[in-house]
Image: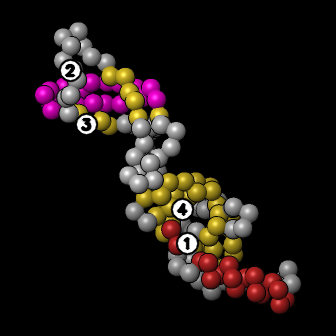
Amino acid sequence: MRVRVTAYPDYVFKGKISTLGAAVDPATHRLFVRSVIEDPPEHRLVPGMYANFVIQTGDPARATAVPVDSVVREGDGTMTVWVTTDERHFVKRTVEIGLLQDGYRQILKGLDRDELIATQGAVFFEQHARAEFALNGPGART
């Protein structure tokens, strides 16, 4: 954790999180965080100072991301996307999801970077596949 206070804008204090709250407040979407900040021998920090915190939880990572609407949650909790090679035939693929940001869902496993997927209406593919299975059995092609 890096901390800057308005009284010393060019000085960066270092710290660590010591306590995380048990739950996020549903009304404010806030989480209680307590931290221990290193105060230099000059004792620059005093109660009531305004500060900005940068909390780094890990190294940045590059990953594939897909629109949120392209991921379907199955009844058993698994997440799937519909993959295509010719934009006419689609195959359901189980994926492992990660973070959600700006309408995109991070895909950690199960999808290669250059694969084509259904980006809209994926839930309708699922409904169509179930109807096809009910009519034609397990050998039906979606």
In magenta, the rendered stretch is 1-19
* First-in-chain label (1 vs 2): 2
* First-in-chain label (3 vs 4): 3
* First-in-chain label (4 vs 2): 2
Kind of residue sitting beneath label 4: Arg
| Residue 46 circle label | 2
Label 4, secondary structure: give it. Answer: loop
Q: Nearer the viewer, residue 91 or 127?
A: 127
CA separation in Å, label 1 and label 2: 50 Å
CA separation in Å, label 3 and label 2: 15 Å
Within the image, what quadrant is residue 71 found in? Answer: bottom right
Residue 122 placed where, x, y %?
A: 59, 77
Task: Report the quarter where the N terminus lies.
Answer: top left
| Residue 52 circle label | 3
Give the vertical position of 68 relative to 142 (above or below).
above
Circle 4 sits on which residue?
113
- Mark nearer the viewer, 3 or 2: 2
Label 2, secondary structure: give it. Answer: loop
Kind of residue sitting beneath label 2: Val
Q: Nearer the viewer, residue 6 or 88?
A: 6
- Mark nearer the viewer, 1 or 4: 1
